[in-house]
Amino acid sequence: MATVASVEHRLSMSLTVEPAGLRAIRHDIASRLCEWSIEAIADDVVSVVVELLTNVFEHAEGTCDLEIQALADQLFVRVSDTVITLPALRPRSSTAEEGRGLLLVDALTEHWETTSTASGKVVICMFEITSRPTREG
């Protein structure tokens, strides 16, 4: 049986991303999703957030705004930064050592897109809360 968020939940934070801080961010987000009773998708959401934050560290000097919002049966992740270059999904390659992150985002989300803003861009990812059963055991 799937768990559905019955009310809106929101987490917003401005971050300066450092690789050493990603573990704490992972833990904080997983804990928050558990508090919201949507732990069934927590692993996927955390993986996507960490991938997006890693991209911010590598391409946007580490500064971004992160917002996670749960509404009824959907969860949205928004990561905004000041880089105007939009990310692009690269062709799959078994030999590539870089550039696979958006393939992960694409595989774990129901939908994702990037939108230009007045100050840079925002990557928006959508997850279906009701599409994944809760784990038992």
Image (tube, helix red, strand yellow):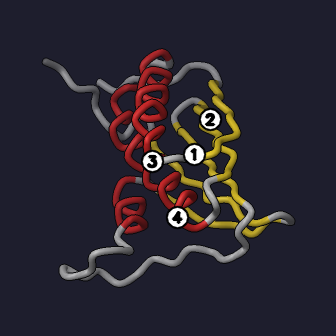
Q: Foreground: 51 or 69?
A: 51
Q: Quadrant of residue 129?
A: top left
Judged by depth in the image, the label closer to the viewer, 1 or 3, is: 3
Residue at 86 percent of width and 66 percent of height? 118
Q: Are the residues tagged 1 and 3 within 8 Å (C-beta)? A: no
Dot 4 or dot 2: first in sequence order is 4
Spatial separation of the CA atoms under disc 1 and disc 4? 19 Å
Of all residues shown, which one is farthest toward the left? 137
Residue at 13 percent of width and 18 percent of height? 137
Dot 1 or dot 2: first in sequence order is 2
Q: Which mark is residue 69?
A: 2
Dot 1 or dot 4: first in sequence order is 4
Q: Foreground: 72 or 9?
A: 9
Q: Are the residues tagged 4 and 3 within 8 Å (C-beta)? A: no
Task: Identify residue for label 3.
Answer: 19
Residue at 38 percent of width and 33 percent of height? 42
> Residue 124 placed where, x, y %?
60, 55
Spatial separation of the CA atoms under disc 4 and disc 3? 10 Å
Task: Identify residue for label 1.
Answer: 77
- Does residue 96 appear to the left or right of 137 in the view shown? right
Q: Quadrant of residue 51?
A: bottom left
Spatial separation of the CA atoms under disc 1 and disc 2? 7 Å
- The image quadrant where one finds the N terminus is top left
Spatial separation of the CA atoms under disc 1 and disc 3? 20 Å
